[in-house]
Image (tube, rainbow, N blue to C red):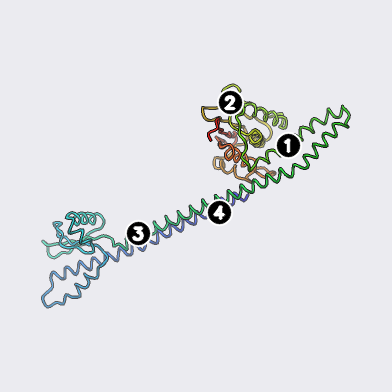
Amino acid sequence: MNLYIQTQYWKYLLVGLLTMIVIATILYSNYLAERLAVEERKKIELIANVYKKLNSASDNLDISFMFEIISSNTTVPLILADDKGMIIGFKNIDSIRAKTDPAYLQNTLEDMKKEKEPIQIIFSEDSKNFIYYNDSYLLQQLIYFPYIQSSIIIIFLLIAYFAFSSAQRAEQNQVWVGMAKETAHQLGTPLSSLSAWGDYLETILPENIKEKFLPELIKDIQRLETITNRFSKIGSQPTLSEENLYTEIDTMVDYIRKRASGKVDFIIHQSEGANIRALISVPLFGWVLENLFKNALDAMDGQGRIDIYINSNQINATVDIKDNGKGVHSSKFKTIFLPGYSTKQRGWGLGLSLSKRIIENYFKGKLFVKESVVGKGTTFRIILDKKNNS
């Protein structure tokens, strides 16, 4: 399992732990809120009993303690009303607003009727009062606090995640650029030597040997020069020019066909003759095509068919590369572009990742899996700009 996939698993694990913490916080806060709500109702029931006792109190009964119980409620808003809905009194409600807004108390009473079951004070069969109440400010804060706290934590973690991801991507890009530049530099010296040896062999070899072996040597040297040129362009913004896609694709197909088995058919389909053009860098676009073709060949185990469809509209040109190989599951559509992902025993698994970087970072286009069916094949789609919009 490569480092990038391990990192993804760690991210999922951390998100799972965060979710569990948030859920546990909300559940525990709700549990405390329910306990506090029960205690508040008991307090209101006690106050209701005090009102009942006060109504039937004799003259010699000490009622100061009862008034102390009523006065002890400094948090729970309540309204005392008769059985006809007429408001008799209220407590812990904005008294100034109650005086200036005649409808305020009545609207508050209607809200309380919806929220809580009222507590009856039965004086006689024909006389009843009701205490309507709502949650205290402290209880309301306790109910909403975990959601506010969780939102703040999630926002903070999202900001930290995106900042970390941006820094990580910047670091990865620096590694990519450094590795590419160093590779181009390291190839430069032996490539110059090989080129000199090629020129020397051309002067000393007999004609029959020269005609048989030297052209292939020259082709391989040119191939190495192309590879070095590709690596040297990583990290610097390449110059894009309008190029004929059919010509570039046909050139790369011809190159790959000679290096593939004779059991693979390459068919190029184009909707507008041979004149669909797009903004590309020829060396880098050839690199992308080579990686996609090699990926298709690996998926087909060296035999099958590769169809290339070239289409365009007023803004974009599209290139679809379709093989009839093994295919991939839809869950892997993004994973296969991660550096290090590979189903092969050899190789670094950088081809598709590098191709995506070239198309999206340098060409400002798109590269993605258009469709894939396990056992039937895969289609990659490249979307390119036809005009310079900068």
Residue 333, numbered label: none
Point out the frontmost of discs 3 and 2: 2
**Residue pictured at 67% horizontal, 42% vertical:** 344
Residue corresponding to mark 2: 276
Secondary structure under badge 1? helix
Residue corresponding to mark 4: 10
Hey, what amino acid is under mark 2? Ile
Let me know if residue 353 appears in the view.
yes
Q: Foreground residue, 259 or 188?
A: 188
Asked if marks 1 and 3 touch (Cβ < 8 Å), the reply is no
Hey, what amino acid is under mark 4? Trp
For the residues labelled 2 and 1, the Cα–Cα distance comes to: 28 Å
For the residues labelled 3 and 2, the Cα–Cα distance comes to: 62 Å
| Pointer 3 or 2: first along the chain | 3
Q: Is residue 303 left or right of residue 388?
A: right
Q: Where is 280 relative to 343, above or below?
A: above
Hey, what amino acid is under mark 3? Ile
